[in-house]
Image (cartoon, coloured by chain):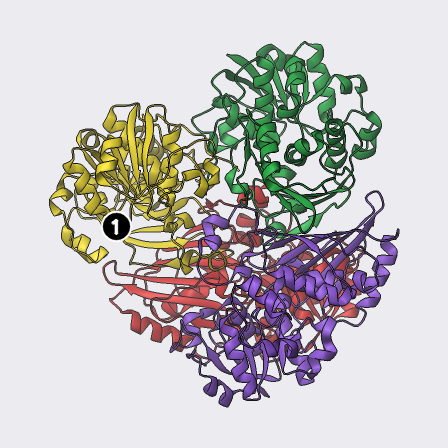
Chain colours: A yellow, B red, C purple, D green
């Protein structure tokens, strides 16, 4: 059994890691931190865990965590994470970081979008961007994975085959994304206050979302050229789920059948990518609670546009699930170990 | 007092007409039809109306309705509506039809998208497309208004200034629309069954939505040239509201300030169009229960794209409210009479 | 036009007062305070008000408010309210206080349940408990109304006829109440954080809810004897609405027909009480956005129990609407002036 | 591997059985029926199952099912179920019936509440009421389990310790229950139509719910005397979950501590019953997707009442999960095999 710690265990990502790790056949949860709930047993704060967990939450001690665990998941806010991560690396631990701190390769870009200088710029090169399906080989060999953001995960997976094959224009790809509310985290704020969200639907941070540079960076690496996106994010009154509707311009005419073939081949042996049959499009409920990324694709003759729709559960494939998938890769386990959940419908 | 009938009074549009007409200072509701609830008092079926309404529902009689009323709102399913409407017109009544039957000018297009030959093609020319802000003059003089669909209303209002002024490319404008569930009507179906919808978000009928030809027809008339759209519709788990996110390509560079000016001028004296200040975007809750169309607009330098976000309450500005607005125009009343509601927030 | 101020205008109750007052034919809104939004125009913070309001929010100045307005609505947190209210009274203003500070007659009870000594115990006697239907005469003559809590309003109205007539036992009446989330106010907290609430249903503060002493006090005054209640509160994932299910034991056998008669007579000329026909029970959507209290009642032979179900919109009849109703009474206006809204369904 | 069939596999209970059985380590799903989807592969109708299931749906053939499977789950509407069940029993199959057809011991009562004469009254005695925790021994030995209704499951488990020990009065126990919408099944109807349900909360079928006789029958068996309940059901706008708030009168004074002790002992080795610590009450989200029944209990001195709050996921412990639990008992498997899910929060 591999002993693992969750640093920042009481945000939604930390809680979802807890759920997945507790049932993972080769993992043992040995250390949980929470500034807010330190000293409490996990089940006092979260009765849904009753019967599964005896561990208490504690305040973070790098040494304590390192003594108890061999593998570290950090699920902390950005800025906070970078300090903690480098400390664990120095102690020889393997780390999967679920914050944004190690996703951007360029410290300048980090400063620009996150408003603070990076304290360990040397680690940025070393960190592997943990989109499992795309960077599997590099993930296998690293000790630091930067787990992707929730929006980027569903978007990059949806576009990778087209960009890899050079099928579409790389300029101003239109990406219209919609996210459930758990994506904004567990800290109370007016933006996630129930009566402000329920029965509403809104666009927010158009052209200003911090996931934009991350998406463009990774799409560029796949396309081997500069990629720009027109990116609008929206808030859906649901707990879990992201759906992306993506409009692209093929360089030459194409047809839906060829596109489906391309995607099926590209993701042939992937346990967590499901390509939909023609004329059916993803729905966030079809992936809820699971690690799947569902993809529907079609070519529209009249518009000369390829449309791709992708859906993930932002807390699983868009967070904790992909982190466990990456850990499976790093540890040499089967990739879907502890992740083989059927989505919860309805 | 103008005596009005609602033909098809127990769908959501019919019920919303009921709400608005009962409080309209110059209207008297004299005749209500419902096949399902015929013989019942309205308040037996709909307790929210208790205290406001003594009328019973009855089965439709053209003669009966014509005797009791001078002005007819038809809120029937398509196909059914066209027969009824022509009968009322022959009896000299003014009619606002809320179905799709008189929106498309070309009977061929009607046949193609609605699967049935039009029985009164001669009326198609006579019918005025009732987007109040765009066709006010024609509405004033007609006896038959084809009230616009819910998606087209918010979309055409969002694009009209740009197309009128020739600012954007008219090819494959990307329109990503999201609608609440009441837009699908009150007939039970799996698509609107609570557990199939709640906590989910999905794309549906991509490239196949019946509002597409209606939108392209009207945008074309405004642009005075052919307009094509890339149109994807989505279902949001809310009752009321449509939000459209629209991505357009300006022919020349422009800036947000000029765009705001353009929109403010274009809609200067409109009581129901609200242009948002920079960096704020519409939210469906800000228009709920009201006849407003809220519009946010911005130019994105890096993408060379103009983004427009518009929001309406699909049952009010996207249905019953715009119908009453058109009736106000036809009857020579003040245009916002009986429609001046503050949105219900939260 | 009567000039009115809202002190604490940006909580949900303050916003609902704003909505109602802006459309009230005899009121003019002259002064709005908000600590959080001071200096901003109302519409900057709340775009749903665009086009209705030019006033800015300002920090509270008792003098400023008194100069601009003749009638004061205080919608502040408890503890804060009592200081402000007495200052306005000293300046000769009429005040309707929507906090809990003047509802309890006994300062001891106030201390016990709200954890602070009352600073103006002499005002407690002078304050009139503003349940309009029950205390109309006293409201007419007072300068200080303590507007009832949201739970108490629907509960007292549901029980008043039975207690007035001495029909039921006054011991441990079972009251099972369910409230929408706006009842908890607009301050962000984990309890009202969207993902903690959506898709859930829970009981909370059983036997410890602060509305309990208020309910028992007022029921006791109606029954002219001590009344105790078994009171459990629950949180429903909706924005607006409270539904109470009340189980009582009649002293003698009775039947549904007599009960309906009793209620219809008791509330005969009340514009805002709607008694349901047999076998139909209230639904919060039937009162949404309106000032109604809907009541269904039945006698169950086998159980020897009378069941009453009542529903209100907690922000209207349970807050801002009843406050305006009380203001109408105090000012000698028609009681339903500015309150005659048809509920928003769906 | 035990081969199992689901008869009626495309209602919500059938789908939930599918989810649980597919992941059960000792079960093999060999036969699925659906009148509606016959001929389709399961994944065509339900994309959330993509990758888990190759079986097609077929029209029911008793022989076909019997040839393919050794164990039968029937998830059909009442009336339909009784015919099918007896046919399977005659062929020597073990059956767990999830309809109401075999729950009531008295055919008269069945006729009264379900409006049809029972065609196999002789089987009513033989059927074992499948509340696993209460009837484990009888379940072990039977070939026909009548799986309990969703309301009865959470209610009986909440009351069993008190009634078994004779602690409370058995007259008119007040049970106030709230259910999510999936409890009404997957057939479209106005009652479960999204816009009729969302943002609302209502009481329905007060004193007329069909689960009433079932609850009273089983409580009576536990108490060894007649038990009557005052039972009101409500609809909550959530997909999954039932919460029951139960008000009882103890015969003698008692305290919360003793009650907790009693419940902890009574359910000591039960894998699916979780007794909450004092002052915390269940929330449906804490059991979502799991087979738990969570129970909170307290004594209220002032009221002389014991309050119990219980919560289950109606599709799991209130349906498919308990059916699998019963199957585990009948087959001699560990009782929580294939059921050991951590609830999905949020």
Q: Position of residue A35 (x, y in %)?
A: 33, 47
| Displayed quadrant of residue D84 | top right
Please name the residue that numbered disc 1 is placed on.
A78
Residue A292 appears in the rendering: no
At label 1, counting other C-alpha atoms closer than 10 Å, the crowd grade (few under 14, some 14-19, many 20 or more) is some
The answer for which chain carries disc 1 is A
Residue at x-position 73% and y-position 24%? D102
Instruction: Specify whether B319 is left or right of B73.
Output: left
Left-right relation of C21 to A312: right
Q: Is residue D80 left or right of residue A115?
A: right
* Residue nearest the observer in this picture, D282 or C229: C229
| SS type, badge 1 | loop
Q: Position of residue A314 (x, y in %)?
A: 38, 43
Quarter that holds the N terminus of chain A: top left
What residue is shown at x 56% (from left), y 73% (from top)? C17
Would you identify the image quadrant in which residue C54 lies?
Answer: bottom left
Q: Nearer the viewer, residue D301 or C233?
A: D301
Residue D311 shows in this picture: yes
Residue A205 image position (x, y, % from top left): 33, 59
Residue A13 in picture, x, y percent from top left: 36, 42
The residue nearer to you, when weighing B250 against D281, is D281
Residue D67 relative to residue A72: left or right: right
Q: Residue furthest left?
A: A122
Q: Is residue A250 above or below residue C344?
A: above
């Amino acid at each position: 059994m591999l002993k693992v710690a969750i640093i920042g265990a009481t945000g939604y990502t930390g809680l979802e890691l807890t759920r997945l790790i507790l049932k993972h056949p080769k993992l043992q949860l040995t250390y949980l931190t929470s500034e807010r709930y330190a000293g409490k047993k996990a089940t006092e704060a979260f009765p849904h865990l009753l019967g599964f967990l005896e561990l208490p939450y504690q305040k973070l001690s790098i040494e304590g965590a390192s003594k108890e665990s061999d593998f570290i998941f950090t699920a902390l806010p950005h800025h906070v994470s970078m300090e903690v991560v480098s400390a664990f690396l120095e102690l020889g631990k393997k780390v999967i970081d679920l914050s944004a701190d190690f996703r951007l390769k360029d410290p300048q870009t980090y400063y620009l979008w996150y408003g603070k200088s990076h304290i360990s710029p040397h680690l940025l090169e070393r960190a592997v961007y943990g989109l499992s399906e795309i960077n599997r080989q590099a993930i296998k060999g690293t000790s630091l994975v930067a787990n992707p953001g929730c929006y980027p995960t569903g978007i990059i997976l949806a576009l990778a085959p087209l960009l890899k094959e050079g099928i579409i224009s790389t300029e101003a790809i239109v990406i219209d994304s919609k996210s459930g509310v758990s994506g904004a985290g567990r800290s109370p704020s007016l933006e996630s206050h129930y009566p402000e969200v329920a029965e509403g639907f809104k666009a927010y941070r158009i052209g200003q979302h911090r996931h934009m540079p991350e998406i463009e960076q990774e799409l560029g690496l796949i396309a081997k050229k500069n990629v720009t996106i027109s990116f609008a994010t929206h808030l859906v009154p649901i707990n879990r789920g992201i759906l992306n509707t993506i409009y692209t311009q093929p360089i030459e005419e194409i047809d839906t059948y060829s596109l489906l073939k391309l995607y099926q081949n590209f993701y042939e042996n992937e346990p967590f990518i499901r390509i939909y049959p023609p004329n059916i499009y993803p729905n966030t409920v079809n992936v809820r609670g699971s690690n799947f990324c569902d993809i529907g694709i079609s070519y529209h003759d009249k518009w000369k546009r390829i449309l791709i729709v992708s859906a993930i559960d932002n807390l699983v494939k868009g967070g904790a699930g992909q982190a466990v998938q990456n850990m499976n890769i790093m540890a040499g386990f089967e990739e879907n170990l502890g992740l083989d959940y059927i989505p919860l419908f309805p």
